[in-house]
Amino acid sequence: MFDSLRVPVVVAPMAGGPSTPELVSAAAHAGAFGFLAGGYLSAAGLAGQIATTRERCGDTFGVNLFVPGIRSTVDVRPYAERIGAEARRYGCEPGAARWDDDAYAAKLDLVVAERVPVVSFTFGAPLAADIERLHAAGSAVVVTVTSPAEAQQAAAVGADALCVQGFEAGGHRGLFNDDPAIAAGGELCGLLAALRLISAVTDLPLIAAGGLVHGADVAAVVVAGAVAAQLGTAFLLADEAGTNPVQRRALAEGARPTAFTRAFSGRPARGLVNRFLREYSVPAPAAYPQVNNLTRPIRAAAAAAGDPESMSLWAGQTYPLAHGPAPAAEIIMMLREQAVEALRQGAGRFA
Ligand SMILES: Cc1cc2nc3c(=O)[nH]c(=O)nc-3n(C[C@H](O)[C@H](O)[C@H](O)COP(=O)(O)O)c2cc1C
């Protein structure tokens, strides 16, 4: 599946705007592979993106979906009250803190009907029966994992490959269960440690994700046994990415540290530190997607006002080194050249 790529680079699915059919098809034409981000889209919206991508690059693409979690029973009201005051700063009302399943069933039916070549999942493993439906449709299935226990669960339900996400990664952690009582026992693993620990419990092909921004990093994870490297942040400044202009500016400045927060969505995600993240990370409850729905109007109002301080500026730890603005093909070509050079130099150290 990924072992035949000319460049072992996967352009990560990035929901909320950055992933576009143009970015995914540019990756395919450059010899890499890209995922559309199905998260937050309606089934009809995703169908449109699949059609546009197919027109542009045939069958070299994948689609990523969010697996719905267990409905949190945490009381969101105290957080909603605080967020109400914040919303008024932006002249808007907070959203309703309701749970939803991101139209998962409809989008799953869609990717089965469309025979999408590769379907990846995050926030959990799909049911074995759903993986069987995807296999019957000819799709390969990738599940994002952050620990050996999650890797074993994904293998047990029939995944064909795993995307191993280290804590360096930008955006949401792919944790199967974000219940703090359960997650507390789980260690946060850096990418190399996660790759090593997970390859000890499964023979499935592993795609490595988290903080990879240079071709030497791509070479490093391939040498460590990964079939490919999945990069998100490295493509946020690509011309074809739909990254919000305010986020582009904050990324290009490179001045802020990154941190994990539940403040925007109720699930831990890594982004650039801004005022909202600083003020609300402590009180934010583990309640996804209720908190995501609650804060949506504030994030939208801040973006419309060009204010980075209340937007979710998702990015991985190495974001200041991301190349761009540039065409995705240029970024992929640069990664390839850097990887070849790093391998040459590295091999010399062991001669
Ligand atoms: C802006 C942004 C949005 C993301 N959205 C998704 C998503 O929709 N689905 C998913 O599986 N991963 C998502 N991720 C995580 C990526 O799949 C990947 O794990 C991460 O980008 C790797 O770390 P890096 O950003 O340092 O390259 C997102 C990452 C970013 C930066």
Image (spheres, helix red, strand yellow):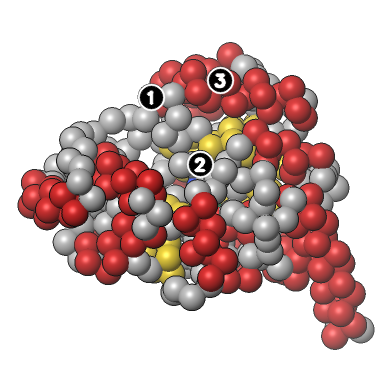
**Dot 1: few (<14), some (14–19), or many (≥20) neighbours within 10 Å?**
some
Q: Quadrant of residue 125?
A: top left
Q: Quadrant of residue 324?
A: bottom right
Disc 2 to disc 1, C-alpha distance: 18 Å
In the image, 142 versus 203, the foreground residue is 142
Q: Amino acid at mark 2?
A: Gly
Vertical side of 127 occupied by 295: above or below: below
> Which of these two is toward me, 322 or 203?
322
Point 53% across, 18% down: residue: 110
CA separation in Å, label 3 and label 2: 16 Å
Q: Cβ–Cβ below 8 Å for labels 3 and 2? A: no
Disc 2 element: loop
Q: Pointer 3: what residue?
A: 47
Residue lying farthest to the top in this orientation: 113
Identify the residue under disc 2.
Answer: 17
Q: Residue at x 22, y 62 (%)?
A: 280
Which quarter shows the N terminus? top right
Q: Does residue 289 lie above or below 196 as drawn?
A: above
Which tag, 2 or 1, sits closer to the chain's start?
Answer: 2
Provide the residue designation for mark 1. 103
Q: How many marks?
A: 3
Mark 3–mark 1 CB contact (< 8 Å) = no
What residue sits 50% from the left and 49% below the top? 244
Q: Earlier in the sequence, mark 3 or mark 2?
A: 2
Disc 3 element: helix
Q: Where is residue 56 shown, x and y percent of the image?
A: 75, 28
